[in-house]
Image (spheres, rainbow, N blue to C red):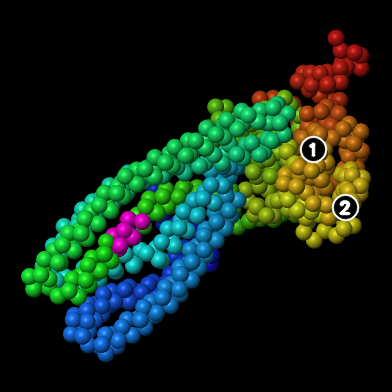
Amino acid sequence: MTASGRRKRRSGKKAADRPLGWLKPYAPAYMRWAIPSWACLLGEVLVDLSLPTLMASIVNVGILRNDTAYTLRLGGIMLAIALSGAVLGNFRNVFSTRASQDLGTSLRGDLFRRTQALSLAALRRFGTATTITRITNDVMQVQNLSLMLTRMFLRAPLMLVGGVVLAVSLNPGMAGILLATIPILALLFAVRLRRGLPLFRKVQAALDRVNGVLREFLAGIRVVKVFHRTEFEAQRFDRANRDLTDIGVKAARSMATIQPIILLVMNGSVLFLLWLGGVKVDSGGARVGDVMAFVTYFQQILQAVGMLSMIFTVFVRARTSLTRIGEVFAEPEGMKEPAVPKAPERTGAVAMEGVDFAYAGASAPALSGIAFEVPAGLTCAVIGATGSGKSTLVQLVQRFHDATAGSVRVDGQDVREFASDELRRRVAIVPQHSVLFTGSLRENLLWGDADATDEEISRALAVAQAADFVGRMPEGLSTRIGQGGVNLSGGQKQRLSIARALLRRPSVLILDDSTSAVDFETERRLRAALRAECAGMTVLLVAQRIHTVMEADTILVLDEGRLVQQGTHAELLRTCDIYREIYRSQVGLDVAGREAV
């Protein structure tokens, strides 16, 4: 079972109960590389701790007694031990790098998949910029921490404990310096940790703002240029960038102000130790080699304390990132899959009964008391003023959201009882804003059906009135599409999106104002082709143009989230004031065909 699969079983737990509990599924894979790394690291520590003692023996016996053979023998042993330490260090680097990189890869992948499972409301609440930052920068901070754990986390306490034991065994009289120095350093590190954690939270929030400004600028670059707002956008980015710099400098300064004090304590202790060792050697209370070894162990102890300081610094920043990542994993999935999904016979019938829906935090519901039924194979148009709830209504059919009251049915079954992949096979939607992805034109169309043949693609393009302009492209279906379809016009993107949806061969096709960028003549041909191609297919058609909906079998008129009337074009002209006003405002004629006053 994957880490993401194991996590699903605990999705009901609140983040507050186990703020870092989401990390547990990653432990087995991480330990597979971390344990060999720690084993190599233990060997390195034993090497480092043995060398000062051997050096003391060389000085006390080999040099002071002028025993060249002893010096050479122990020197050879020291060289062999040092070489073995270097080999262990190389293996430790390989294992630790693999552990951190694998963790980062798994974490990024699971975060990406988790965002796919979130509701649209949750994604809006997190925001695009901060979601990107969590998947990239926050994961990188966790990777840095995991690398530190396998390279330094165990090394520091082992060196600290081992160094203290060996130093005290060499000269208990000088051990008092250790007892005085280590608590002072521990206090300084605690202060550093306490001051740094809230500041690094602000650093990540400032980074979110920088990414947000940058993303808005790149997405709206054409509008920025049209309105000549490049300088304004540059100033906006500079403000966000400066805020990030200021808080970053403040966080670094907060951490750095303690560092000189730490170095002062460490170096002052070494100087005092050297003076005390010299006094003891002069008085005969210690041997030169023992003092040298003690000083070396003392320096190793201080280095270990420094490593702990570095680890705490990385942890302070990573702790914020761990919390932010955990918030994404703790967010409940937007759409719960049914325990026993159903798959009734495909008919294409669509119905709503007493449907209410409100967006989170909205002051008023987007839809209230919606009830209608569209028999299989008919075309149902939805029209109304901007903000009347047209797009929300059809999104409920696709189950982008769940109704807060009532039921939405496809093929006679509540959409919440479908498996999501089964519902999406039956219902295809062409959204208001056409989205194409970087890749070839063929690759974009195959989103509708990965197994579609070139003949099927050509037919879908012909129905969508896209065959002509695709045929004029030098590379045809192999033409590369830029990010978001930047090298295509709005109308071209809409027609390609329609062709992509047709390739899915759904029983319900939703066109959410998907011809708004197409000229009237092309739209007329498109409607005629769709009527022929979609015979037997239920079509939900959202539009602003009265000409687009006139030929529909039935028309739903929405106003402020309510279904005010349903009927054919002719019926609504006679009975619905709102529809008649829309018709009059666009066509300029009254019901009898005379010019409207």
Q: Residue 300: horizontal and vertical position, in percent?
A: 28, 66
Mark number displayed over residue 490 = 1
Q: Residue 353: horizontal and vertical position, in percent?
A: 66, 37
**Which secondary structure, mark 1?**
helix
| Residue ID for mark 2 | 476
Q: Residue 555: horizontal and vertical position, in percent?
A: 79, 31
**Which secondary structure, mark 2?**
helix
- Residue at image position (57%, 27%) is 364
Task: Label the magenta part by its dominant secondary structure.
Answer: helix
* Residue placed furthest toward the bottom: 69
Judged left or right of residue 356, residue 9 is left
**Quadrant of res 120:** top right
**Residue flagged by tag 1: what amino acid is it?**
Gly
Q: Is residue 308 magenta?
A: yes
* Position of 492 relative to 2 (above/below): above
Mark number displayed over residue 370 = none
Judged left or right of residue 141, residue 191 is left
* Position of 303 relative to 36 (above/below): above
In the foreground, 254 or 528: 254
Q: Earlier in the sequence, mark 1 or mark 2?
A: 2
- Quadrant location of the C terminus in the rendered image: top right
Crowding at label 1, few (<14), some or many (≥20) Cα neighbours within 10 Å?
some
Judged left or right of residue 317, residue 595 is right
- Residue at image position (43%, 42%) is 248
**Highlighted magenta segment, given as a residue range:** 303-310
Q: Is residue 441 magenta?
A: no
Residue 39 visible to an observer of this rendering = no
**Residue flagged by tag 2: what amino acid is it?**
Gly
* Residue placed furthest toward the top: 597
